[in-house]
Amino acid sequence: MALPKFRGGLETLIIKNKMIKNIRKTYLIIILLTSGFTFAQPQFSEYNSMSGAFSRLGFGARGMGMGNAMISVVSGNLVSYYNPAVSTFQEDNYFQTSYSFLSFDRTLNFLNFTKKLEIGNRKKRIAGISLGIINAGVNGIDGRDNQGIKTGDLSTSENQFFVSFSNRFSEKLSVGVGIKFYYFKLYEKISSTALGIDVGVIYLLNKNISLGATVTDINSKYKWDTSKLYGLEGNTTRYDFPLLFRVGATYKFNNPHLLASVEFEHSNAQTDFLRLGSEYNVFEKFFLRAGVDRISISNPDIPARPSLGFSYQKNFNSFDVGINYAFVIEPYSAFASHIIGVGIIF
């Protein structure tokens, strides 16, 4: 009778050993997957979760259609969003507005005016001014109380108001400074403001090559005070914007009429992005564009954002009216973004 008991105990021991090995394998797989996710994603999460993410998406159909590689572009219609030094290169007064079609009930709108100033009589000094607004938000947020009963629809609104001044110190060098004011309405009685500074430089190497550099969002940060909503349980917190350092170069071909631009961005969130953009003048006042935004050098897990676009202008007596469009692929959305704008040159 002892032998069968021994066999049964041995079989039980073998089964337990197999179960322990399977459990160990399962834990090992979970640890490997978790650690891989943990170490692969922090750079991406930190950059995109930092304040002011809406203001880093780009500006208008032209810039976003060229992958936002606009820091050194000095021809065509310009906006100081990309570089506060570019307004001295704007040939005529330029006004533009854009509306974006986005997924997840998001909104993104743009408004801008850029003007070159010639100061003095005999020896004119060239300066420039550019001002604009970026409005973003989310609508249709489901609001519920502590019992889960719906109380209504909520929305958020985040805005950037900017103005920049630039001066042409020589035929080749232009320097500009931009001031940005942010206003974020998050919830009832909860809002925050921020003030930031941009500094930019443009240098014309020759008739075809232009170079640009900027430092963006100096001192930009949100301060939140929830005591107005939660009373003594509220607190005060601060969230900084990432500080961005950008350099870029643009080459303008004479024939064909092609513009090619490249840009590199480094942030204090330890991200390094490369941007590429191009613009082809098919015929008079009709342009095709293509670009790739956020090609990550430091973290290959961050997906790039390809884009396409076009614009067409038509003359009406003393002013031109242009239609601009950009198609931007968003990595984590089932639908692409569509940016449609109108520009007026006078």
Image (cartoon, helix red, strand yellow):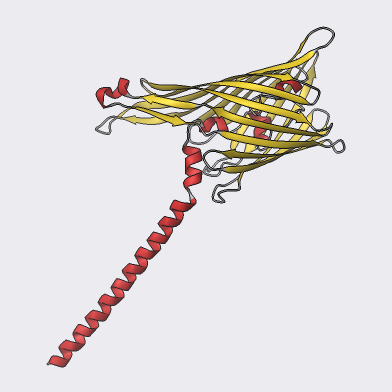
Which quadrant holds the N terminus? bottom left
Measuring from the top left, give residue 54's x and y in whole percent: 53, 31
Q: Nearer the viewer, residue 298 or 254?
A: 298
**Location of residue 19 by image quarter:** bottom left
Which quadrant holds the C terminus? top right
Let me know if residue 68 appears in the view: no
Q: In the displayed structure, does residue 55 sit left or right of residue 67?
A: left
Q: Nearer the viewer, residue 209 or 325?
A: 209
Let me know if residue 261 appears in the view: yes
User: Furthest-top residue in view?
Assistant: 121
Measuring from the top left, give residue 209's x and y in whole percent: 80, 35
User: Furthest-right residue in view?
Assistant: 255
Q: In the displayed structure, does residue 6 sit left or right of residue 245?
A: left
**Location of residue 211 by image quarter:** top right
Measuring from the top left, give residue 196's x and y in whole percent: 54, 24
Residue at 76% from the left image edge and 20% from the top image edge:
169
Residue at 26% from the left image edge and 27% from the top image edge:
233
Q: In the displayed structure, does residue 106 sit left or right of residue 337?
A: left
Q: In the displayed structure, does residue 80 sit left or right of residue 219?
A: right
Residue at 87% from the left image edge and 38% from the top image edge:
255
Measuring from the top left, give residue 167's x and y in whole percent: 72, 19
